């Protein structure tokens, strides 16, 4: 079970973040993996369903670990990837940066939830299926890079379906080949190893039959 104070603190944070992000960036911002994981974590906190914590952990532990490493390295003056450079820009308010700091603590909270609730062995397929649905949606229905100068805060290249740079699409291969590479590579190289590690580290939830 997740303790009530943790449920309330998590809920209070989400209650602030969701309307702020919706107003600042629009609803498509909530199609990012990290935002989906945040909302699934909220559902896990209140329902005590392990799958709702386990699936997002499979999806975000690796990328958010990179975020954490880059943040700490940048804080020490030695940035690794530059992905957290925005967290140190004075032009961005402390309030906005404070909200974005959930990228740091969310993976740790999800691990704590799994410790409390157990790791659901269905998590790999649950998150992989979600990602397989989400990636084509982001590719075919959401804007490609670069950002629109008239609306620079509207998300583009959501979940990197056009490449790793939000300012321009990748040119190493045809666009659909990149999408196919993501759809095959993320489950095999990121989600599956994370699933195997979590399966080894944590007991299954008592209601799930192995």
Image (spheres, rainbow, N blue to C red):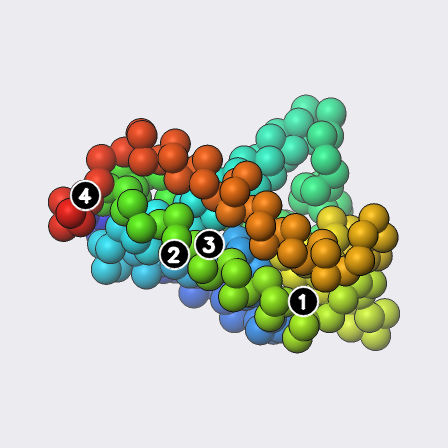
Which secondary structure, mark 1? helix
User: At x 22% / y 40%, what residue is drawn?
Assistant: 204
Q: Quadrant of the C terminus?
A: top left
Where does label 2 land, which residue?
126
Q: Are marks 2 and 3 in contact (CB under 8 Å)?
A: yes
Q: Is residue 194 visible?
A: yes
Residue 94: which numbered mark, if any?
none
Which secondary structure, mark 3? helix
From this view, report whether residue 87 is shown above or below residue 26: above
Few, some or many C-alpha atoms within 10 Å of disc 1 (few <14, some 14-19, many ≥20)? Answer: many
Where does label 1 land, which residue?
139
x then y, percent, for residue 15: 43, 65
Few, some or many C-alpha atoms within 10 Å of disc 3 (few <14, some 14-19, many ≥20)? Answer: many
**Camera-side mark, 4 or 1:** 4
Where does label 4 land, which residue?
210
Query: Of callouts 4 and 1, which one flags the residue occurring earlier in the amino acid sequence?
Result: 1
């Amino acid at each position: 079970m997740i303790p009530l104070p943790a449920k309330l603190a998590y809920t209070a944070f989400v209650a602030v973040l969701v309307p702020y992000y919706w107003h600042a960036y629009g609803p498509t911002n909530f199609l990012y993996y990290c935002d989906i994981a945040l909302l699934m974590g909220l559902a896990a906190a209140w329902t005590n369903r392990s799958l709702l914590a386990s699936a997002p952990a499979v999806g975000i532990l690796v990328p958010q670990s990179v975020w954490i490493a880059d943040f700490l390295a940048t804080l020490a003056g030695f940035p690794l990837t530059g992905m957290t450079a925005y967290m140190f820009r004075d032009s961005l308010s402390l309030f906005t940066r404070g909200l974005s700091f959930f990228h740091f603590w969310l993976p740790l909270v999800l691990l704590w939830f799994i410790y409390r609730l157990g790791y659901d062995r269905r998590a790999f397929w649950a998150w992989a299926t979600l990602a397989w649905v989400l990636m084509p949606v982001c590719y075919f229905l959401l804007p490609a890079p670069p950002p629109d100068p008239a609306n620079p805060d509207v998300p583009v290249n959501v979940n990197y379906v056009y490449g790793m740079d939000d300012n321009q699409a990748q040119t190493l291969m045809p666009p659909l080949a990149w999408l196919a590479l993501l759809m095959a590579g993320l489950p095999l190289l990121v989600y599956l190893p994370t699933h195997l590690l979590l399966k080894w580290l944590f007991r299954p939830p008592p209601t799930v039959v192995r």
